[in-house]
Amino acid sequence: MFGVVPLALFLILLSFNGEIFKDKTILVLFLTGGIFNFFYSINFVISYKVPYHVMNMENYGKFTAVSGVVISVATLLLTALISFFQNNFDYFKVMLYVYAFSLLLVVAYFFVTVALKRVNGNSVPEKEEGKINIFTYKPFYSTLFPNFLRGFCAGIVGIIVTIGFYEKILDARSASYLVIITNAVSIAGCLMYSLFAAKKAEMGLLLFSSIGVFAFLPLMFVGKAKKLSRRDFTLL
């Protein structure tokens, strides 16, 4: 997660002076963003392994659901807080504190991670107990391409509000509504997952949710998009 440090520092510098890199701003943004996403993707894969070492896997579904709800609620509250300050104070001054806060979260992430304690009782192959080279680790390189595609698609979905602004489909108010709806759906999804996980039905859940995403995402391109108003979200 320390891969985010160059990106955060770059954005902090931009908040002080938007012209500091002049015509190189986009290039530096792609470079620092690329560094972060490369290491974040490795962290994402390793995160699948960590639960086997630090928790009773019988509680994995419950922990995943609870953490998903907490993350969604925290995201919703932080988004609302940032929007409030942006509407009342200078944008770049607000974002300066936001990016600085993100650096503090990386430090907190580090200390929380190293504080995790190993638990016994989970089934982990002996050959995987020792240190491994992540680049020769079969689950890493065999899923590298599909994970790359998933990250690419998830990234597009993650910046859907930015795309909406660019295409003039969203304004500040409707974008806030979209963030609220997205987080509400995420909370509901986590709660549903906890129910399915309790019934040991993860395989079916993964299959049908994947089919659902595959089937419904293309519907974004159906019809002609129009600017969303407050009334549209009220009706929704």
Image: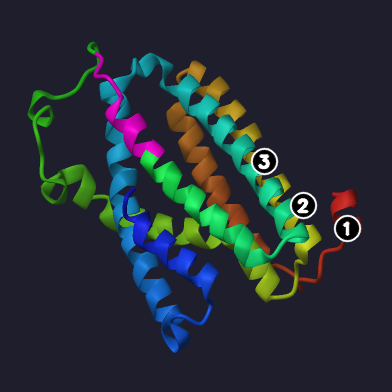
Residues at marks 2 and 1, CA–CA distance in whole angstroms:
9 Å
| Mark found first going from the N terminus, 2 or 1 | 2
Magenta span has 111?
yes
Residues at marks 1 and 3, CA–CA distance in whole angstroms:
20 Å
Q: Quadrant of residue 203?
A: top left
Q: Residues within 10 Å of mark 1 (few under 14, many from 20)?
A: few
Magenta span has 144?
no
The count of marks equals: 3
Mark seen at residue 77: 3
Mark seen at residue 177: 2
Does 14 sit left or right of 144 as displayed? Answer: right
The amino acid at mark 1 is Arg
Does 29 sit left or right of 184 as displayed? Answer: left
Given residues 216 and 148, the one toward you in this image is: 148
- Foreground disc of the pair 2, 3: 3
The amino acid at mark 3 is Leu
* Vertical position of residue 37 compared to residue 73: above or below: below
Residues at marks 2 and 3, CA–CA distance in whole angstroms:
13 Å
Residue occupied by mark 1: 230
**Who's the residue at 39% across and 65% down the image?**
33
| Mark found first going from the N terminus, 2 or 3 | 3
Q: Quadrant of residue 66?
A: top right
